[in-house]
Image (cartoon, helix red, strand yellow):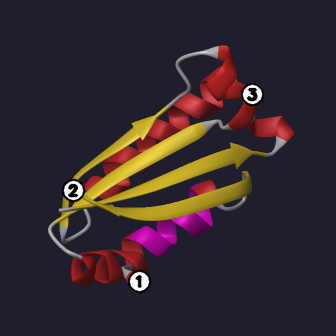
């Protein structure tokens, strides 16, 4: 299994509780529906230390790295990025982990 972890720091005007929750929810729904995704979570910081560094985390689970590449270029993924995340994100960090 591959777990793709995405950490997001939002631009100051978007870094608030309501926007974090909204982006976590819309991202989770959009990403989970993409072919090859076994599950997806949109998460918000649970404590002040996490919130000081990051505003959102997405964890997306796949069977293998080929599914990650299919997801990465899928039109629904690109649409989520272009419409929701990229306009509001200051920094994004992405890693793939093997479980």
Rendered position, 91 above or below 29 = below
* Residue drawn at x 47%, y 38% as measured from the top left: 24
Q: What residue is disc 1 on?
A: 73
Residue 12 pos. (x, y %):
85, 38
* Spatial CA span between label 2 and label 3: 28 Å
Query: Element type at marker 3?
Result: helix
Mark 1 or 2, nearer chain start: 1
**Magenta stretch: includes residue 46:** no
Along the line of sight, which residue is nearer the eye, 71 or 7? 7
Residue 27 pos. (x, y %):
44, 49
For label 3, count other residues whose C-alpha is less than 10 Å away and answer few (under 14), some (14-19) or many (20+): few
Q: Which residue is mark 2?
A: 99
The circle on residue 95 is none
Helix, strand, or loop for circle 1?
Answer: helix
Whether residue 35 is situated above or below residue 5 in the rendered picture: below
**28 in relation to 20, above or below:** below
């Amino acid at each position: 299994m591959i777990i793709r972890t995405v950490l997001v720091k939002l631009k100051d005007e978007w870094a608030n509780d309501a926007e974090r929750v909204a982006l976590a929810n819309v991202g989770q729904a959009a990403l989970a529906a993409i072919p090859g995704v076994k599950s997806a979570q949109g998460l918000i910081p649970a404590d002040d230390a996490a919130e000081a560094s990051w505003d959102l985390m997405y964890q997306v689970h796949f069977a293998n790295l080929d599914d990650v590449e299919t997801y990465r270029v899928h039109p629904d993924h690109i649409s989520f990025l272009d419409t929701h995340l990229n306009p509001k994100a200051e920094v994004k960090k992405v890693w793939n982990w093997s479980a």
